[in-house]
Image (tube, rainbow, N blue to C red):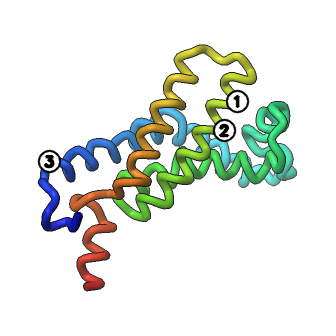
Amino acid sequence: MKFKERPTNIDCALLMLRGAGLVLFFTFGLEKFKFLIQFLKSGQPWDKVPLAGLIKGVGFPFPVILAVFAILCESIFSLLVVLGIGTRIFSVLIAISMIGALYTSIYIKDPVISQGSAVQYILMFGALSIAGAGKFSIDYYISKRAR
């Protein structure tokens, strides 16, 4: 279905769904991003990256890379989704990160509420990766100008 044919209420719903990125950013991403910036300024070795110890303890490979990836997903990538920039690709990346978060919360026996929020983010960002950003996004205006 082309954008012109799609009802506006669907685009409004996609905008609201993208707003979930703000919840992710303010709930988890902002604090972790601040920790990452402080870490980069400190000059500590890379194996001390925030979250790397937890990721290593769970048994995932490449804990430093995955820690930076998770922090970027919950901060920068979630803001890009809110703006509607690269919505599909960043939504896929965030959903993958949330699958890792869900596995981790189950592995360390984190409270059910944390597992529930990971499932919600997987569903929300999974839906955005399929549907895209909608008309009310920068992606839409870029594609419109390209035509």
Nearer the camera: disc 1 or disc 3? 3
Q: In which quarter of the image is residue 80?
A: bottom left
Q: Where is residue 9 drawn, in percent x and y?
A: 14, 47
- Which residue sits at x=73%, y=40%? 50
What amino acid is at disc 3? Asn
**Mark 2 Cα within 10 Å, few/some/many (few <14, many 20+)?**
some
Residue underneath mark 1: 104
What amino acid is at disc 1? Thr
**Mark 3 Cα within 10 Å, few/some/many (few <14, many 20+)?**
few
Q: Where is residue 135 drawn, in percent x and y?
A: 22, 61
Query: In front here: 63 or 39?
Result: 63
Q: Is mark 3 on a helix, strand or loop?
A: helix
Q: Is mark 1 on a helix, strand or loop?
A: helix
Q: Residue 9 carries which label?
A: 3
- Which residue sits at x=51%, y=30%? 119
Residue underneath mark 2: 100
Give how far apart the Cα atoms at labels 3 and 2 are: 33 Å
- Picture layout, residue 112 above or below residue 19: above
The answer to whether marks 1 and 2 mark residues whose Cβ atoms lie closer than 8 Å is yes
Say whether residue 68 is left or right of residue 120. Answer: right
Give how far apart the Cα atoms at labels 1 and 3 are: 36 Å
Q: Which mark is residue 133?
A: none
- Which residue sits at x=52%, y=41%? 30
Looking at the rendered image, the quarter that the N terminus falls into is bottom left
- Which residue sits at x=53%, y=41%? 29
Looking at the rendered image, the quarter that the C terminus falls into is bottom left
Work out whether mark 1 precedes mark 3 in sequence or the reverse, and give the earlier one.
Answer: 3
Query: In front here: 75 or 113?
Result: 113
